């Protein structure tokens, strides 16, 4: 009997080992799109034009549209889009082996999105033309599409020639720090920065076939970066809870796909950990992949955010870089969930990719908010250094002119809410809380570095 149990345990251990994805030999670095040169954007544009000629842009747009109801409003949102953008990147690399999808940190221009350096003629393009809304500049200028009908690639800023303000980095920082389940983090991201960018650009970007606009790829690469930061911050690399595409979420769930962009039966677990299996990339502002695959004795990886990013920004866009799994340099020991309060600002717990401002954000929050507000909205800070410091509004305008109040976040439109099958009351409650975060910060002495 004992022998039988021992053999069974050995068999289970062997099965687990066989299912553990191998570490990638080389891990490419996805860079902040704002750091790309004009020649790098031209190289991206050349690849996209060739992919379009071969029908790939249509295939990605139509696939996303057909799967829409299964990949939004549930926890499959993150693993699907991680695999979807990776598949786009893999196809693009057959045209240019140095191609890597950059990420668009939209919090960098949250106050005035239309002035973002990506929304220029040398990158993603500006607003669509009056009347037709056809995009006439940028790397997809004058692109004609055939799905779901013959039309030009359209863009239609949601406030005329400007775009309503997006979500401040501090709001996203709150979600990164306080959300302890992926189901909650997914909801907060999908209701906030995800929808705000899609609706801000509008045109094709507020449709089910938005993936035909390359803005979709760089936007979802950023959401993927935030998910990876959240996974690291909470030591939750394999957390997949809530409701998936077909019921209760499970790591063994098959990621939804269709014949236009097949994933060949890939499971959710196959994309959960960057640097393993076929997920051979990371981000220039994020921690490196863990030294061992989670579940096989791995602890949280060292918090070396920003170090490999400096390396990535020195190379050419998409240049494949070897990322040794044993990187040990640290800016601070990564706090594990439940391991006690952090004793200083942890730069990974921020919605921004700017390391310098992340540190400023954390330290200023600790010095402006009381412990109650820190516990409620920014628990990753651990403790407050001060009681709540209320802003003195009688101060002269000149004295406060260097620090603008944070703008209130935009609402999702009724059409967008209906399109995604969201609960309107739940979305409204979410928005009220996001506005409360802004009110707390604006009524304190906190001065945003952004």
Image: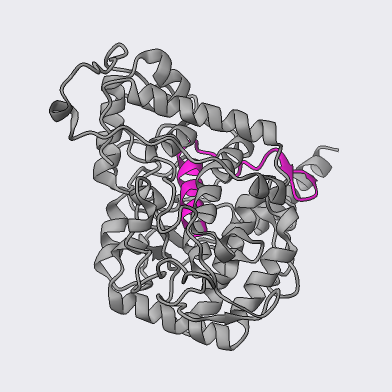
Where, quadrant-wise, is the N terminus in this rendering?
top right
- Picture quadrant where residue 116 is located: bottom left
Colour mapping: one colour
- Identified at 80% across, 40% down, the residue is 5
Residue 423 on the magenta segment: no
Can residue 255 be seen here? The reply is no
Left or right, 218 with respect to 441, comes to: right
In front of the other: 342 or 181: 181
Left or right, 122 with respect to 293, comes to: left
In front of the other: 8 or 292: 292
Give percent across and percent down for residue 80.
64, 57
Residue 247 on the magenta segment: yes
In front of the other: 100 or 51: 51
Give percent across and percent down for residue 401.
18, 33
Establish if 361 lies above or below 151.
above
Establish if 329 lies above or below 161.
above
Establish if 402 lies above or below 194.
above
- Identified at 64% across, 77% down, the residue is 58
Judged from this view, the residue extending furthest toward the right is 1
Establish if 202 lies above or below 38.
above
Judged from this view, the residue extending furthest toward the left is 398
Give percent across and percent down for residue 297.
53, 42
- Identified at 30% across, 48% down, the residue is 354
Judged from this view, the residue extending furthest toward the top is 387
Can residue 181 be seen here? The reply is yes
Magenta highlight range: 220-249
Where, quadrant-wise, is the C terminus in this rendering?
top left
Give percent across and percent down for residue 358.
30, 40
- Picture quadrant where residue 111 is located: top left
- Picture quadrant where residue 383 is located: top left
């Amino acid at each position: 009997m004992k022998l039988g149990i021992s053999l069974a345990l050995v068999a289970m251990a062997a099965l687990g080992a066989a299912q553990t994805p191998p570490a990638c030999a080389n891990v490419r670095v996805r860079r902040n799109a704002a750091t790309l040169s004009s020649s790098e954007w031209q190289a991206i544009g050349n690849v996209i034009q060739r992919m379009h000629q071969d029908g790939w842009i249509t295939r990605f747009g139509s696939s996303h549209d057909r799967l829409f109801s299964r990949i939004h409003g549930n926890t499959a949102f993150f693993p699907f889009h991680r695999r979807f953008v990776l598949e786009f990147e893999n196809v693009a690399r057959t045209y240019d082996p140095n191609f890597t999808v950059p990420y668009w940190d939209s919090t960098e221009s949250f106050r005035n999105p239309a002035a973002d350096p990506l929304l220029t003629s040398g990158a993603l393009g500006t607003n669509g033309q009056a009347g037709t809304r056809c995009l006439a500049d940028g790397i997809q200028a004058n692109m004609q599409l055939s799905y779901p009908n013959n039309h030009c690639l359209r863009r239609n800023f949601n406030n005329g020639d400007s775009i309503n303000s997006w979500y401040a980095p501090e709001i996203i920082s709150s979600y990164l720090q306080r959300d302890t389940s992926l189901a909650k983090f997914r909801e907060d991201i999908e209701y906030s920065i995800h929808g705000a960018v899609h609706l801000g650009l509008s045109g094709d970007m507020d449709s089910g076939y938005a993936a035909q606009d390359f803005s979709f790829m760089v936007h979802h690469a950023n959401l993927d970066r935030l998910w990876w930061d959240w996974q690291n911050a909470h030591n939750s690399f394999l957390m997949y809870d809530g409701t998936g595409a077909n019921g209760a979420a499970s790591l063994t769930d098959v990621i939804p796909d269709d014949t236009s962009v097949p994933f060949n039966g890939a499971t959710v677990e196959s994309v959960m950990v960057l640097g393993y299996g076929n997920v051979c990339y990371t981000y220039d502002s994020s921690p490196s992949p863990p030294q061992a695959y989670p579940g096989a004795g791995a602890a949280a990886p060292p918090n070396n955010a920003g170090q490999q990013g400096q390396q990535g920004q020195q190379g050419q866009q998409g240049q494949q870089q070897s990322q040794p799994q044993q990187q040990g340099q640290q800016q601070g020991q990564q706090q594990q969930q439940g391991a006690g309060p952090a004793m200083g600002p942890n730069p990974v717990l921020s919605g921004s990719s700017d390391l310098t401002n992340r540190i400023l954000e954390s330290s200023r929050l600790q010095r402006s908010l009381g412990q109650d507000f820190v516990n409620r909205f920014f628990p990753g800070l651990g403790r407050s250094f001060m009681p709540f410091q209320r802003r003195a509004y009688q101060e002269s305008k000149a004295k406060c002119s260097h620090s603008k109040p944070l703008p209130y976040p935009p609402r999702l439109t009724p059409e967008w809410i209906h399109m995604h099958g969201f609960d309107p009351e739940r979305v409204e409650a979410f928005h009220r809380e996001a506005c409360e975060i802004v009110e707390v910060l604006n009524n304190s002495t906190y001065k945003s570095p952004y």
